[in-house]
Image (cartoon, rainbow, N blue to C red):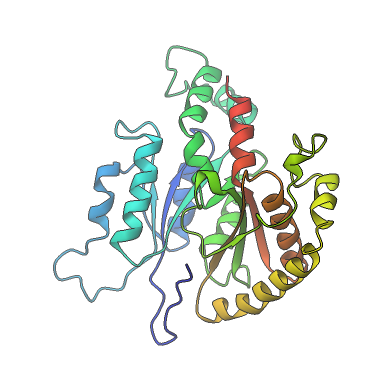
Amino acid sequence: MTNLHSKNLPAPPPLILVTGPSGAGRSTAIRALEDLGYEAIDNLPLSLLPRLLSAPPGAENAPERPMALGVDPRNREFSAEALIDAVDHLSTLSDRPVQLLFVDCSPEVLERRFSETRRRHPLAPTESARIGIARELDMLREVRARADILIDTSELSPQELRTELEQWAVPGVAGRMAVSVHSFSYKRGLPRGVDMVLDCRFLRNPYWEPELRARDGRDPDVAAFIASDARFVTFQKQLSEMVQLLLPAYETEGKSYLSIALGCTGGQHRSVAMAESLARTLAEGGWQVSIRHRELELRASRASAP
């Protein structure tokens, strides 16, 4: 799944789709990306997205710029399925890397923000903001789970959000390529747009241990159970060495962002433990690393839904 560009050709500029619940900072993120050199368009209907990748007549020699497109859940064309389909379709129309950025925020902070500004929630104009927030978060649950980049603004100021975006969106600002490590379940398919995928299903499965089944791979007992597999140490060592060998090569080729996905059957135990281990090793090696546990995030989102 690796997509390296020749050293003689510049990597095509990225296209970032930005969405998230009302009040989380989506518009702030769009403005920040515009200040960082992105061609930014906010509140764009999904049906117009493919046309943006078609250069107008006479513009063939014009330099391409990175693009940031804001997708507002309040738009009449919006649905989680339509947005996910649009991202998948855009990836086939151009060699631009397409990333989905989800600007998130906790329901409690969103409610406080609406209260402080005395704004009505757009999805509950005649009801409480809490009801509108719950509706919108439910609408966005699948989009959040599919996001390539997730930034939680619950405790971020606008300037801190800008700093966070600089680390992801501007090559060289953070000094090194950004790395994202994902865990996932093969039952729900591969994460979209990842560069490298590894299968952890050969390791001992804590699911079959009754006292471990309800926990996940971040739990020390679960991690220890997986590490007791005779193949674990060799796999962990060789995986870490391989990734650390490849990252500088990707960086030299001009990539500013690389995503690595580790999968297991349910996405709860083995892939989570291995993702945590790999992310920790890379961070200790000086790489800028974020971690996403797709199935755990989806489970937590469903548990918090009204």
**Quarter of the view holding residue 106:** top right
Which residue is outermost to the bottom? 8
Residue at the location (41% across, 63% down)? 97
Q: Nearer the viewer, residue 86 or 263?
A: 263
In the rendered image, is residue 105 in sight? no
In the rendered image, is residue 85 in sight? yes
**Image location of residue 289, percent across then percent down:** 66, 61
Q: Which of 121 and 256 is in front in this view?
A: 256
Image quadrant where one finds the C terminus: top right
Residue at the location (37% across, 50% down)? 87
> Taking 123 as reference, is 77 left or right?
left
Residue at the location (15% across, 71% down)? 58
Q: Which of 304 and 215 is in front in this view?
A: 215
Residue at the location (43% across, 22% down)? 123
**Image location of residue 244, percent across then percent down:** 68, 75
Image position of 53 with respect to 25: above or below: below
Q: Nearer the viewer, residue 19 or 262?
A: 262
Image position of 12 with respect to 16: above or below: below
